[in-house]
Image (cartoon, rainbow, N blue to C red):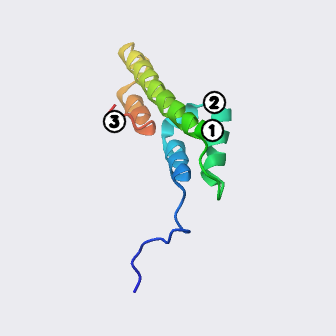
Amino acid sequence: MTTGTFSANERAPVHSLTALALLADPVSALLDQGRLVAITYIAFREDQPTRHSELALFRECVRDLGRLREKLKQAFTIAYADGDMDDATMQRLIDRFELWSD
């Protein structure tokens, strides 16, 4: 009988899951290339503990993603209010950057 669970050595390390979650955020495409490379390296490396500097990088990226989301919302709102984009374009941008609940 299988239980559908993973053994201890089959589980992804927490740092890998955190890094993948950051990379999955559509706004992360706006982070600088160096950070994206560092996060990708952390996500796919094996058998290494998470370092303090990596945790700090995760915190900074989460904070920066929040700021970027705010800037995107502001830019989209201004462009829409000024008539520079129509409803359909605004909706596509909201969907693309997953800004529904923001």
Label 3 is placed on what type of residue?
A: Trp
Relative to the observer, which residue lies in front, 65 or 81? 65
Amino acid type for the residue under numbered disc 2? Asp
Question: Could you tell me which residue is drawn at 51 percent across and 68 percent down?
Answer: 8
**Residue for badge 3:** 100
Instruction: Indicate which disc residue 76 carries.
Output: none
Mark 2 surroundings within 10 Å by alpha-carbon count, few (fewer than 14), some (14 through 19), many (20 or more): few
- Dot 1 or dot 3, earlier in sequence: 1
Q: Horizontally, is 26 left or right of 51 in the view? A: left
Secondary structure under badge 3?
loop
Percent position of residue 10, x then y: 54, 68
Of labels 3 and 2, the one closer to you: 2
The amino acid type found where label 1 is placed reads: Leu
Q: Which mark is residue 36?
A: 1
Q: Which residue matches tag 2?
A: 32
Q: Position of residue 7 (x, y in %)?
A: 49, 72
Check if mark 3's residue and mark 2's residue have beta carbons within 8 Å. no
- Of mark 3 and mark 2, the one earlier in the sequence is 2
Q: Mark 1 and mark 2 in contact (Cβ < 8 Å)?
A: yes
Q: At 51% from the left edge and 47% from the top edge, which residue is drawn?
A: 18
Tell us which disc is closer to us: 1 or 3. 1
In the depicted view, which residue is nearer to us: 85 or 2?
A: 2
